[in-house]
Image: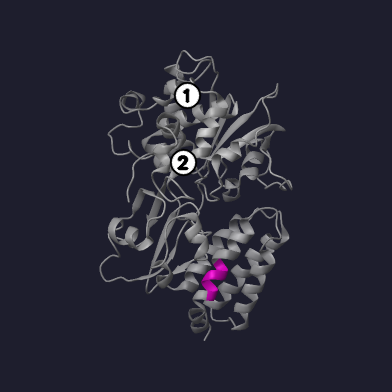
């Protein structure tokens, strides 16, 4: 189950330092990269089936192809390292243990889309990881790996800038992220009817997640077959899965797509801690519909399997919930977060999150009524698909799934 592509250097002492990174394969893909045309790199990524690992699971190569033909305008690569989803803590493993892999991935990806400037947007609370990333970038500049020439020999300018976020969860949404980098309030943008690239100061740009970009060097160096030999037909490759909660071995593990969730929890996670039994799992970060213990038995860790079972893979942040945990408290904990983090741009989201928060507070304080549960579900439907971004539909997914699957607990709390 465990496959080490992105994480293969994580266990090496001082793997974040350039000297150690070079000894263990970092930047080996660059020589091959510059023997290929940019379109060939994009095509290799398309053949690999690489999918975005920031939650949506969109295919990476076709996304790169949305960039317009190269012209006199500058173009940009923007790397999303905001990682503010509760239960998700995988990208920071790359910042901590192998930042040079991310830099290598940025060089490969930027060459493919014709960008010479890359921005890494990183969660503002990640101060320690930001410092480590900046140290690696400084090492790369000093060594001539990036700058006016790549690797001191290839005539391709590559500049990388780290942009620290202000702490807003909504800036993990790519258009809100761009607004933030442009110096504006982080409000998501209205989406065009047709597919197109992103726009940064009205210039073409591509936004990809940290782990997605970090997966590119292996594909460039070893070919798409080195990636497609893992995973499933529709979800090839691997992903960093974060497992939190009362299991014996919580942590971050790189697994191939398609693993059985119970095998991951019991064999890699070591099973539940002594005396505890599994009640539910939120499979991919706090915005994914919850799975009961019975549903977990049928769950596989890939996008299509999760959709078939009524949930989503998200960022792979599995949150393990044991028997004895109040699902009313779980719902209240989550809605407090979403109520606080709604950017307020859209009325259904701004008012809906606050309304559900208020109702759940009343239930916990003993003044709730059974019809309040129908009101919550009604508000969830009002929030779904009626806002600029997917924040409100994500809130609907998790809250609705908890109320519907554990309704008896809410009624017991009310009574």
Residue at point 67%, 64% (across, down): 383
Query: Which label sits on residue 33?
Result: 1
Q: Bin the neighbour count of mark 2 within 10 Å (Cα to Cα): few under 14, some 14-19, many 20 and up.
A: many
User: Which residue in the protein does label 2 denote?
Assistant: 211
Residue lying at 39% horizontally and 46% vertically, measured from the top left:
230
Q: Which residues are magenta?
A: 399-404
Main SS, magenta residues: helix
Q: Where residue 249 sits: x, y (%)?
A: 29, 56
Mark nearest the camera among 2 and 1 is 1
Q: Residue at x 31, y 28 (%)?
A: 24
289, 296: nearer the viewer? 296
Q: Position of residue 257 (x, y in %)?
A: 42, 51
* Front residue of this view, candidates 288 and 143: 288
Circle 2 — which element?
helix
**Colour scheme shown:** one colour
Q: Residues within 10 Å of mark 1 (few under 14, many from 20)?
A: many
Q: Position of residue 284 (x, y in %)?
A: 47, 56
Between discs 2 and 1, the one toward the N terminus: 1
Left/right placement of residue 263 relative to residue 410 reads left
* Callout 1 secondary element: helix
Q: Residue furthest bottom?
A: 415
- Name the residue furthest left: 274
Q: Is residue 39 magenta?
A: no
Residue 162 makes an appearance in the image: no
- Measure the alpha-carbon separation of dots 2 and 1: 19 Å
Q: Is residue 226 visible?
A: yes
> What is the quadrant of residue 179 in the picture?
top right
How far across and how far down the image is residue 387, in percent? 70, 57
In the image: residue 49, left or right of residue 10: right
């Amino acid at each position: 189950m465990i496959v080490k592509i992105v994480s293969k250097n994580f266990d090496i002492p001082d793997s974040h330092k350039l000297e150690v990174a070079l000894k263990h394969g970092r930047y080996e893909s660059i020589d091959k990269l510059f023997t290929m045309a940019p379109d060939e790199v994009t095509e290799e990524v398309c053949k690999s089936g690489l999918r975005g690992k920031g939650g949506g699971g969109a295919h990476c190569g076709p996304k790169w192809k949305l960039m317009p033909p190269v012209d006199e305008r500058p173009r940009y690569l923007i790397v999303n390292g905001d990682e503010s989803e509760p239960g998700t803590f995988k990208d920071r493993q790359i910042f901590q243990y192998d930042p040079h892999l991310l830099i290598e991935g940025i060089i490969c990806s930027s060459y493919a889309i014709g960008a010479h400037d890359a921005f890494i947007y990183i969660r503002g609370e990640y101060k320690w990881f930001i410092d480590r990333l900046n140290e690696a970038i400084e090492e790369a500049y000093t060594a001539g790996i990036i700058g006016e020439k790549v690797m001191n020999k290839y005539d391709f300018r590559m500049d990388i800038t780290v942009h620290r976020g202000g702490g807003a969860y909504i800036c993990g949404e790519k258009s809100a992220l761009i607004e933030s980098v442009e110096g504006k309030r982080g409000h998501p943008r209205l989406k065009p009817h047709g597919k197109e690239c992103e726009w940064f100061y009205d210039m073409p740009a591509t936004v990809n997640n940290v782990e997605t970009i970090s997966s590119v060097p292996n594909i460039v160096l070893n070919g798409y077959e080195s990636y497609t030999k893992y995973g499933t037909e529709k979800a090839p490759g691997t992903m960093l899965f974060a497992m939190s909660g009362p299991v014996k071995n919580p942590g971050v593990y790189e697994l191939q797509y398609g693993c059985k969730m119970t095998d991951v929890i019991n064999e890699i996670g070591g099973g539940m801690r002594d005396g505890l039994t599994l009640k539910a799992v939120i499979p991919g970060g706090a915005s994914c519909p919850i799975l009961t213990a019975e549903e977990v038995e049928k769950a596989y860790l890939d996008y299509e399997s999760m959709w078939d079972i009524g949930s989503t893979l998200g960022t792979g942040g599995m949150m393990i919930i044991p028997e004895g945990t109040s699902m009313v408290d779980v719902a209240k904990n989550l809605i407090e977060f979403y109520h606080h983090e709604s950017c307020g741009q859209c009325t259904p989201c701004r008012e809906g999150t606050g309304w559900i928060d208020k109702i759940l507070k009343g239930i916990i304080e003993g003044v709730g009524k059974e019809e309040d549960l129908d009101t919550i579900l009604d508000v969830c439907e009002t929030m779904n698909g009626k806002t600029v971004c997917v924040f409100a539909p994500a809130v609907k997914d998790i809250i609705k799934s908890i109320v519907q699957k554990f309704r008896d607990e809410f009624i017991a709390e009310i009574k």
